[in-house]
Image: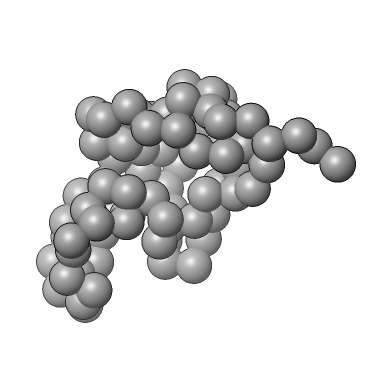
Amino acid sequence: MTTPVLCRVNINGRNCRLLSDRPASYEAIVYAANPNRDVNTLFSVTYSGARSGSLSPGESVEVTEGMVFNVFDTGNA
């Protein structure tokens, strides 16, 4: 069993910490970026760091130290 570690990440220019022992979901990243968001709004989520990519609703990514997440409002569902 891996000991949880808080990884420093950047979400929309803000320094945050996420646990490294579990994947970060699209929903968790969107919430961290926009806690007061309209639930009917879709967001584009991209990330970079040890690897780069994007997340869609229901997807997740393993968290590593120094990852950068960008979350943009793409409009209503």
Asked if residue 24 is positioned above or below residue 27 in the image, the reply reads above
Q: Going by the picture, which residue comes out furthest to the left? A: 75
Residue at horizontal 22 percent and vertical 53 percent from the top? 34
Residue 19: x %, y % from top left? 57, 39
Q: Going by the picture, which residue comes out furthest to the right? A: 1
Asked if residue 76 is positioned above or below residue 62 in the image, the reply reads below
- Quarter that holds the C terminus: bottom left
Residue at horizontal 76 percent and vertical 34 percent from the top? 3
Residue at horizontal 24 percent and vertical 74 percent from the top? 39
Q: Relative to residue 67, is residue 30 drawn left or right?
A: left
Q: Relative to residue 23, is residue 30 drawn left or right?
A: left
Q: Quadrant of residue 73?
A: bottom left
Residue 77 in sight here: yes
- Quarter that holds the N terminus: top right
Q: Quadrant of residue 10?
A: top left
Residue 9: x %, y % from top left? 42, 29
Asked if residue 41 is positioned above or below residue 33 in the image, the reply reads below
Residue 49 in sight here: no
Residue 29: x %, y % from top left? 38, 50
Residue 4: x %, y % from top left? 68, 36
Q: 68 or 35, which lies in front?
A: 35
Q: 55 or 5, which lies in front?
A: 5
Task: Count how many numbered circles sit on residues in the image.
Answer: 0
